[in-house]
């Protein structure tokens, strides 16, 4: 379900970025743009992707192996 939502949201976002991305993009340019945007967005809020990812994995119970110091 999450992947379907991401697919729909990413194609809408890519459509809004018309003129900023190459006319014919296999998704690579969009994903690069998204990762750069996300990095800036998280930095503005004082967050780091790896930390958020780890905390959410802990909350969902999907973190296996070594337990993070954030727990």
Image: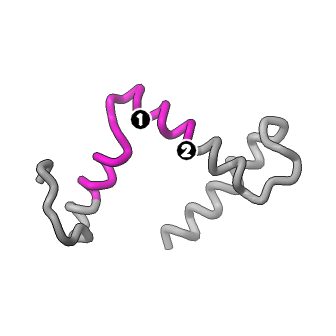
Please state the horizontal and vertical placement of residue 58, each as a whole percent of the image.
Answer: 21, 61
User: Given the current orientation, which residue lies at the most extreme front position?
Assistant: 66
Instruction: Give the main secondary structure of the magenta stretch.
Output: helix
Which residue is nearer to you in this view: 63 or 8?
63
Residue at position x 75%, y 40% in the image: 17
Residue located 63% across and 63% down the image: 7
**For the residue labelled by badge 2, is the local secondary structure a helix, a strand or a loop?**
helix
Residue 19 spot, x, y in % from top left = 84, 37
Q: Which residues are magenta?
A: 36-56
Describe residue 30's horizontal placement relative to residue 22 as left or right: left
Indicate which disc residue 42 carries. Answer: 1
Q: How many numbered discs sit on the rendered protein?
A: 2
Direction from residue 64 to residue 11 in the image, left or right:
right
Percent x, y of residue 22: 84, 44
| Mark closer to the observer (1, 2) | 2
Q: Is residue 71 above or below residue 57?
A: above
Q: Which mark is residue 8?
A: none
Which colouring convention does the figure follow?
one colour
32 or 61: nearer the eye?
32
Lower sequence index among marks 1 and 2 = 2
Residue 40, placed above or below residue 6 = above
Q: Is residue 43 magenta?
A: yes
Determine the secondary structure under disc 1. Answer: helix
Please report the residue visible at 11 percent of the width from the left and 53 percent of the height from the top: 71
Quickly name the residue at label 2.
35
The residue shown at (65%, 62%) is: 8
The answer to whether mark 1 and mark 2 are in CB contact below 8 A is no
Q: What separation in Å lies between label 1 and label 2 (alpha carbons)?
A: 10 Å
Rate crowding at label 1 as few (under 14), some (14 to 19) or many (20 or more) other CA atoms within 10 Å.
Answer: few
């Amino acid at each position: 379900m999450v992947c379907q939502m991401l697919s729909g949201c990413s194609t809408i976002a890519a459509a809004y970025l018309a003129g900023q991305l190459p006319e014919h993009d296999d998704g690579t340019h969009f994903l690069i743009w998204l990762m750069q945007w996300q990095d800036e967005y998280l930095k503005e809020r004082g967050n780091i992707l790896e930390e958020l990812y780890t905390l959410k994995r802990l909350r969902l119970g999907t973190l296996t192996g070594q337990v993070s110091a954030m727990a």
